[in-house]
Amino acid sequence: MSPTPARPPTHSAEIYNLSRGPETTTQRVQRLQTEARMLAQEQVEALDRELNALAVRALEIAEGGEAYPAGIRELASRIATDLPQKAQTLRAILERTRRG
């Protein structure tokens, strides 16, 4: 079980034209909403990476043999299976929201 490679964030930066004058309230709200969406996307992408990293660690414990109690190995095995699926669901939702 190998984690899915993380995609680099895709952000578009806007250069503000100083000769344009101050931004209106509507423009400011739109800019702040765009920034909030970008930050939320970054946080979801970080969670995706962390879930996959935890799945790898759980698999190591699950396959760790007698050094770990049987109940812990079994639980770690279930976690190692479950977390990549959860991360995939996160990615799918994020992709859908990017498109629409």
Image (tube, rainbow, N blue to C red):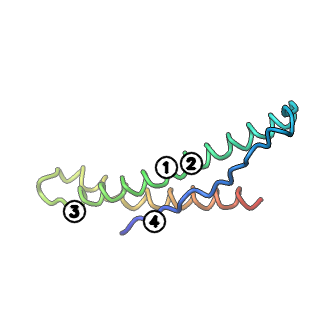
Looking at the picture, tell me which residue is in the foreground, 70 or 42.
42
Instruction: Using the numbered discs, state the Cα–Cα distance from disc 1 to disc 2 in whole angstroms.
Output: 6 Å
Q: Which mark is residue 42?
A: 2
Name which residue lies at 70% across and 58% down: 98
- Left/right placement of residue 43 relative to residue 69 reads right
As shown in the figure, which amino acid type bears the numbered disc 3?
Glu
Does the residue at mark 4 contact the one at mark 3 (Cβ under 8 Å)? no
* Residue that carries the numbered disc 4 in the rendered image: 5
Instruction: Using the numbered discs, state the Cα–Cα distance from disc 1 to disc 3 in whole angstroms.
Output: 26 Å
Instruction: Using the numbered discs, state the Cα–Cα distance from disc 4 to disc 3 in whole angstroms.
Output: 23 Å
**At numbered mark 1, what does the secondary structure look like: helix, strand or loop?**
helix
As shown in the figure, which amino acid type bears the numbered disc 4?
Pro
Does the residue at mark 1 contact the one at mark 3 (Cβ under 8 Å)? no
| Quarter-of-image position of residue 40 | top right
Which quarter of the figure is the N terminus placed in? bottom left
Does the residue at mark 1 contact the one at mark 2 (Cβ under 8 Å)? yes
Q: Which mark is residue 84?
A: none
* Residue that carries the numbered disc 3 in the rendered image: 63
Q: Sequence order check: which comes first, mark 4 or mark 2? A: 4
Q: Sequence order check: which comes first, mark 1 or mark 4? A: 4
- Measuring from the top left, give residue 33's x and y in whole percent: 74, 39
* Residue that carries the numbered disc 1 in the rendered image: 46
Looking at the picture, tell me which residue is in the foreground, 59 or 33.
33
Assess disc 3: are there few (<14), some (14-19) or many (≥20) residues with their C-alpha within 10 Å of its C-alpha: some
